[in-house]
Every structure is written in C-alpha cells, then in structure tokens.
C-alpha cells in the first residue's frame, strides 16, 4: 500500500492531477485483488477423489490438474483445477468449473454480467470500450457481443420454460409483494427489427422488390394503476412497467404474455385490461388467455382510422371535410360507434371507392365494443397503448434499429431479453440462475 501511495503522490507532484493518482491506485488495487482471488481459488482445486460423476450418469477418472486462463473484473488470472476424463467417450471436465460458474467459458460471472449490461445498452464495439474504460478489462466487440447474446438467449430459454410451466399450471407464480393495486394493464404491439438476408429469405415484405428486410418482434408491457389525477385521468404507478419481447409466433407469444400477466397478479387483481391497436391476433390471444379482461383499442390508432376515412370522404365533401372529421372524432371519443359507421355509410361511393369505404368501416364495426371510450374514461381507465409503443421505441428501437444494423434471430433475441429485463427492473433475476453457464457461440 505504501508503494501505491508513493506512486500516486508522485503523479500529483508531477502535475498530472488527481485523475492520474486515481488511475495509479486503482490499477494497483486491481492487481492486488487479482492476486488475492487467484490465491483463494488455488486453495481448492476441486479434487473429489479418484473418480467423479460427469452429470450424465457416467463416472470419469482423475487425470491430473490443468490450468484455466480466466478474465475477471479484477483482471486476468489462472485457475488450477482437478481434471477428470472418461476414456469411453473422450469427454473431460473440471468439477471446479461448474462450482465457480465458468464451465466452458473464459469470463467470470462478474465480468459476464458487466459485459452483458454494457452490450445491452450500446453497440458491441462501444460496449467493449466501455468495459475497458470503466473496469480496465480488454475486450473485443465481437467477444462482448457473443457473450451478451449467449447470456440473453439463456435467460430467454428460462423465461419461455417458466411461461410454459405457468400455462400448464405446473408452476403458480407468487403474487407481487405488498398489496395489489386496483388495475393491471397488458399493452401489446409489434415492431420490425432489421435482419440479415438469411433471416428474411423467402419472406414477403413492403420493399419495392417485395422482399422483407425486417422481422416482427411482438412486445407486451404490463403495468399497474392505482390513482387518477386531479383531472380524472389515470396515472401509471411509478416503476410498475415490465416488458417481454420475442420473435415467436402469436401462440407462443400469448403463453409468455399470459405468464407475465399472472406473475404480475392477473389472477388476484380486480380490473385486468388488454390494450392493443386493433390487430386481430391481439384480441384472439386476449380471448384465449383472459376472456374476463376488458379489451380496449388504442384511441390514437382509432383516430388515425377516422382520419383515413375522412381523407376518403374528402372526395365527396369538398370544403366540408374538416367539419365532417370533427364530428366523427367527437363520436369516436364518446364511444358512439354506430353513429360513426352510419355517417360513413352515407358516403355514396360506387365501385372501388365503395369497397375502400366498407373496408375502413369494418375496422370500427368489429372493434365497436372495444371503443366505448367515454365509459372507459368514466371508470378511470387508460384508453391508450402508449406504454408499449414507447417500449418498442426505447427498449427495441434505440438498440436494435440503429443505422446499418442487421441481426440474426438468435443475436437479437439475446439482446432483447437483456434489455427487457433491465427495463423491467429484473436484471438481477438473470444472474440468480444456473442458466448463465451457457457457453458463448
């Protein structure tokens, strides 16, 4: 310690400032910490006798000791551990690796956690620089990305398995701690993520050549509400939002969505509400998993459809279109969908324009019971799905839709899972499970 103090004092005396002294002391303490950790690990090499079980029902023989180079938050170190080998299958392993959580890996759990958090926040090259600057660990962007994607996919597998167990009633989630709020919402939406060509091969898309460039990620955001403000508008409970996102088809997504809702107390809460933009698959899932829930079409999406109808009506109404639109929006806000539909049917189009009008009105017809906005507001309910739309932008878009990015499904799934857990304040949940043993690809 005295040598560190002397080196730091020398830095300050040389005019290099406090930051230089901090770097000197920190580097020295990291070296000291790595040495202490290395000695600690050397005290137990994991020898378990002449034979040990491999975890697959076989017994392997002790074959000596082998060194393993390991990167940690304190720096690189070498671990010496007992090695067992089974001649019949040629498989070898070190029991100590399993105990330490480093089987098949070159990073300690602490460094993996640090790397995953950085890689979930910023692009991989920037994440590697961030870890290097803050922790003094040298990583490449490729290694940081592979490690984060692997840990994210391992967490995703656990989440999917838990959701399937909850859906099969093999696992009953405990209700959230504390008293349950009055209302729970599950808002559902989807957004496209740019993918590699191999991931979109054969898929139809909206590009001029008809080919897809993106794949849809389905997202659910669950949040609670206890109060309304002085104007009677609902107020989301602070810190109550949790998120999940997946490329899985709608049925698999529905299982995960329902499991998350039950984890948040859907089975005990008084008022459960499903919010969506009117896409049929959302309501099919709501009916399948929570037939008792109130279903509400996002008001702002509904208003967009009214504007589209008004654009069509403008061909007939000339200078009266603005008044016609205002009247239809008022009907929508009041939940008077029959009046809105009747006004649309009075637009006497023929041919293809009549077909377009009927298609536009069909949206309101099939969703009429989900558009009783005045009634919902009188009950103090949210009528907008802004929480999940904001989640699509912040959780997904701000990390996976940056300029030039192209993802594989596996890579995107890993980062999506990490970001959802972070946004849900459940980051620690990832690192309390043995699934983080999964090696990087």
Image (cartoon, rainbow, N blue to C red):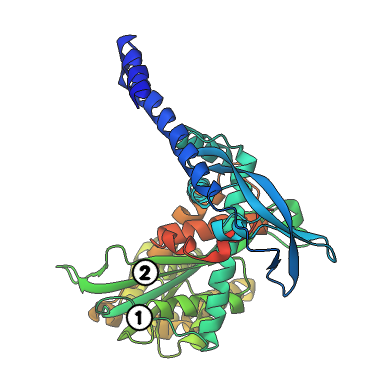
Distance in Å between CA atoms under marks 2 and 1: 26 Å
The crowding category of the residue bearing disc 1, from other C-alpha atoms within 10 Å (few below 14, some 14 to 19, many at least 20), is some
Q: In this view, does 82 lie above or below 316?
A: above
Whether residue 293 is visible: yes
Residue 160 in percent (x, y) is at: 57, 73
Count of labels shown?
2
Toward which corner of the image does residue 423 lie, by quadrant?
bottom left
Which residue is found at the position 55% from the left and 55% from the top?
415
The residue that label 2 is drawn on is: 384
Q: Can you give x and y, in whole percent of width and height, for residue 34 in the image?
A: 49, 38
In-image side of 411 versus 180 (left or right): right
Q: Residue furthest left?
A: 230
Q: Is mark 1 on a helix, strand or loop?
A: loop
Task: Using the rendered image of the protein, determine whether residue 413 is visible from the camera's viewpoint.
Answer: no
Where residue 178 sits, quadrant-wise, is: bottom left
Q: Name the residue under label 1.
A: 175
At 48% from the left edge and 60% from the top edge, which residue is drawn?
Answer: 431
Q: Earlier in the sequence, mark 2 or mark 1?
A: 1
Q: Where is residue 374 in the image (x, y as percent from the top left)?
A: 28, 79
Seen in the picture, residue 278 relative to 432 is either above or below; the reply is below
Pick the front one: 305 or 2: 2
Residue at 51% of width from left, 55% of height from top?
396
Q: In this view, does 92 lie above or below 295?
A: above
Which one is in front in this view, the residue at disc 2 or the one at disc 1?
1
Place of residue 35 in the rendered image (x, y in percent of width and height, measured from the top left): 49, 37
């Amino acid at each position: 310690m005295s040598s560190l103090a002397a080196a730091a004092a020398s830095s300050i005396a040389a005019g290099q400032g406090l930051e230089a002294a901090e770097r000197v002391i920190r580097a020295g303490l990291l070296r000291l910490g790595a040495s202490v950790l290395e000695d600690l690990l050397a005290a137990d090499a994991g020898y378990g006798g002449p034979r040990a079980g491999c975890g697959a029902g076989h017994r392997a023989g002790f074959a000596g000791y082998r060194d393993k180079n390991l990167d940690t938050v304190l720096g690189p170190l070498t671990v010496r551990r007992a090695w067992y080998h089974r001649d019949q299958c040629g498989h070898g392993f070190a029991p100590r690796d399993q105990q330490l959580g480093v089987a098949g890996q070159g990073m300690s759990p602490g460094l993996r956690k640090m790397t995953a958090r950085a890689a979930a926040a910023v692009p991989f090259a920037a994440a590697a620089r961030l870890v290097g600057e803050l922790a003094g660990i040298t990583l490449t962007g490729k290694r940081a990305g592979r490690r984060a994607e692997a840990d994210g996919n391992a967490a995703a597998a656990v989440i999917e398995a838990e959701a399937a167990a909850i859906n099969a009633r093999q696992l009953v989630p405990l209700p959230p701690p504390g008293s349950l709020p009055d209302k729970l919402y599950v808002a559902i939406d989807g957004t496209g993520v740019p993918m590699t060509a191999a991931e979109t091969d054969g898929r139809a898309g909206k590009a001029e050549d008809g080919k897809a460039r993106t794949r849809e990620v389905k997202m659910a955001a669950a949040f609670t509400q206890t109060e309304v403000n002085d104007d009677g508008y609902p107020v989301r409970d602070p810190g109550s939002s949790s998120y999940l996102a997946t490329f899985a088809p709608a049925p698999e997504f529905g299982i995960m969505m329902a499991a998350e809702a039950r984890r948040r107390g859907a089975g005990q809460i008084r008022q459960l509400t499903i919010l969506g933009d009117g896409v049929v698959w959302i309501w099919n899932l709501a009916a399948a998993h929570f037939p008792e829930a109130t279903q509400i079409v996002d008001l702002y999406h509904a208003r967009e459809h009214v504007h589209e109808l008004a654009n069509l009506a403008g061909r007939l109404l000339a200078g009266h279109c603005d008044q016609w639109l205002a009247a239809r929006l008022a009907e929508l806000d009041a939940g008077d969908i029959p009046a809105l539909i009747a006004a649309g049917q009075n637009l006497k189009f023929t041919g293809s324009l009549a077909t377009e009008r009927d298609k536009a009105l069909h949206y309101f017809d099939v969703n009429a019971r989900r558009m009783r906005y005045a009634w919902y507001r009188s009950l103090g309910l949210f009528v907008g799905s802004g929480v999940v739309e904001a989640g699509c932008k912040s959780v997904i878009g701000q990390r996976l839709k940056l300029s030039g990015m192209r993802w594989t499904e596996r890579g995107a799934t890993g980062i999506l899972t990490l970001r959802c857990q972070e946004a849900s304040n459940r980051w620690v949940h990832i690192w309390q499970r043995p699934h983080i043993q999964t090696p990087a690809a």
